[in-house]
Image (tube, grey):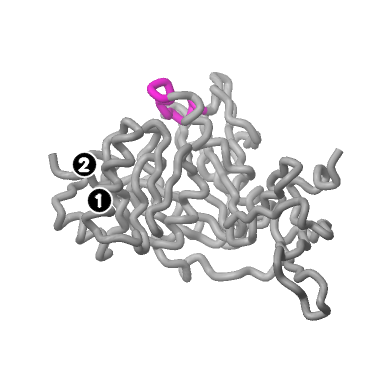
Amino acid sequence: MSQFDALVGHRVVIRSTVPGERGPSGGPALTDVIGRLLAHDGTRLRIQRRDGSEVEVAVSTVVAAKTVPEGRARARTRPALDYSPEELAEICTRGWPPRVLEKLGAWTLRAAGGFTGRANSAGIHGDPGTDFADAVTRIEEFYAAHGLPPKAQVIDETPWARRFADAGWVGIGGTHDHAVVQVADLATVLSAPLAPPTSAEVTLEPTLSDAWLAAAERDASRYEEHDVRHVLASPPIVRFASVRGDEGLEAVARMVVTGEWAGLSSVHTTPYARRRGHAGRLLEVCAAWARDEGADKVFLQTMRHNAPALALYARYGFVTHHSYRYVTPPA
């Protein structure tokens, strides 16, 4: 049994040596990493920092490891609206991870067998590290290699959105063409009026079930199971929320925590169970769980024409951070 087994899932401080460097006293230079220990394989530790980024530390370099207090009381970092659209786009990808991710400079090429646009489009934010024509070619080659149509997720009203439009790329059309990213402080969400008491009890599960997937009305049958499960269930800190009625699951939602950010997704109520406050209760329970996991901010993504969802989220203090759309090359 490893000394690190009992630390997995906890906030830790890991002190390790810096190979090839000397400290002030002439001994090995030391460095500390603070975050949540996600996993270890006997040779490397994988740690999630407060900002959601991950770092690996070689076990052979570790000189000390211990838990540190979990933290509602931890000092918060930046308010949600202080993040740029580019920064938040990266955070959203951590919460909805593709099975394949390649970096093109600051852009991200994402593939997951076609399951959802977010996991199967190029995230356009920052500098691709090459000229635009070459970057577009790289996108087309990447998706051709994965048997998928080339698609880019561009943040509205940015120079990159204009560059793609000038190059002839067009919106995909339909209900999934335009989306908004909304944010809120968890303290604001949790201080909102409670959902009606008629709403049933919410259950949180750490694993993805077929019943939850069916209730979410995500047609997973058209995709490989490993792609679906990777996107939805691979984040280390995730919960699948549900409300059960006499006929099965009546409402579901998903919440993921990556450092200080939580991400709410897949909020869905079956038509016959609507107007019972289920969505509000799901949001409240997921938000409380995320707070207990150390998050202090939450994001969600929804379609800008979804008026009922936007009205619900506004009640809990969500505001629009930015909008985006999917574009594809000219035929």
Taking 259 as reference, is 63 left or right? right
- Does residue 228 appear in the picture of this structure? yes
Indicate the amino acid at tag 1: Val
Q: Residue 175 at what x, y percent from top left?
A: 27, 40
Looking at the image, residue 235 lies above or below residue 248: below
Q: Secondary structure at mark 2?
A: loop
What residue is disc 2 on? 173
Residue 216 lies in the magenta stretch: yes
Per the rendered image, the range of residues in magenta is 213-223
Identify which residue is drawn at 52% across, 31% down.
Answer: 229
Indicate the amino acid at tag 2: Gly
Task: Report crowding for label 2: few under 14, some 14 to 19, many 20 or more residues within 10 A (C-alpha).
Answer: few
The image quadrant that residue 150 belongs to is: top left
Taking 106 as reference, is 16 left or right? right
What residue is disc 1 on? 136
- Which quadrant would the C terminus be assigned to in this image? top left
- Which quadrant would the N terminus be assigned to in this image? top right
